[in-house]
Image (cartoon, rainbow, N blue to C red):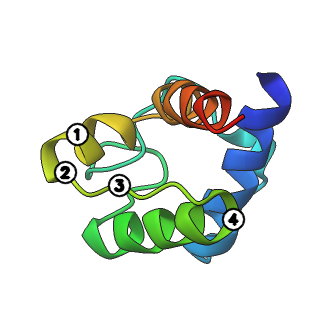
């Protein structure tokens, strides 16, 4: 799971064009909003969801569920891990 979380952090930094070390993102910090360290916005959410679909085949279609899933690296890793497990 730690490898998956690290891969997600790299994906977030790359897809949102942020200039930070992926390792500096903690698993439970908020990713979106003005108080979040990365201060990601709705365009960033779209970029991340598109990158997830391209890299892993994960489609996030429900906006409320997407908001919950993308709220932190830990939530995203948990959802992505379950999605990948269901495909095998």
Crowd around label 2: few <14 · some 14–19 · many ≥20 (10 Å): few
Whole-angstrom CA distance, mark 1 to mark 3, is 8 Å
User: Helix or strand or loop: what does disc 3 sit on?
Assistant: loop
Q: Are marks 3 and 2 in contact (CB under 8 Å)?
A: yes
First along the sequence among labels 1 and 4: 4
- Circle 1 residue: 65
Q: Which residue is mark 2?
A: 62
Residue 67 located left or right of residue 11? left
Residue 60's disc is: 3
Q: Residue at x 48, y 72 (%)?
A: 50
Q: Earlier in the sequence, mark 4 or mark 2?
A: 4
Q: Residue at x 66, y 57 (%)?
A: 56
| Gap between marks 4 and 2 measured at Cα | 19 Å
Question: Is residue 1 placed above or below 57 in the rendered structure?
Answer: above
Residue 42 versus residue 12 in the image, above or below:
below
- Total marks shown come to 4
Q: Residue at x 36, y 71 (%)?
A: 46
Mark closest to the chain's N terminus, 4 or 3? 4
- CB of mark 1 within 8 Å of CB of mark 3? yes
Mark seen at residue 26:
none
Earlier sequence position, callout 1 versus callout 3: 3
Q: Please tell me which residue lies in front, 5 or 20.
A: 5
- Residue 38: x percent and y percent? 48, 54
Horizontally, residue 78 falls left or right of residue 62, namely right
Q: CA distance from mark 4 to mark 3?
A: 13 Å
Residue position marked by numbered label 4 in the rendering: 55
Q: Looking at the picture, tell me which residue is in the foreground, 39 or 28.
A: 28
- Towards the viewer: 8 or 41: 8
In the rendered structure, are the residues bearing label 2 and label 1 in contact, judged by CB atoms less than 8 Å apart? yes
The secondary structure type at the circle numbered 2 is loop
- Front residue (pair 88, 13): 88
Task: Give the crowd class for mark 1: few <14, some 14-19, many >=20 residues within 10 Å.
Answer: few
């Amino acid at each position: 799971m730690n490898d998956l979380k690290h891969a997600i952090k790299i994906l977030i930094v790359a897809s949102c064009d942020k200039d930070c070390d992926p390792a500096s993102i903690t698993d439970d910090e908020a990713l979106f909003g003005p108080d979040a360290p990365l201060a990601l916005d709705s365009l960033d959410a779209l970029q991340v969801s598109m990158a997830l679909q391209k890299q892993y085949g994960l489609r996030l279609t429900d906006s409320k569920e997407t908001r919950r899933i993308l709220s932190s690296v830990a939530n995203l890793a948990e959802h992505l891990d379950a999605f990948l497990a269901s495909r095998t």
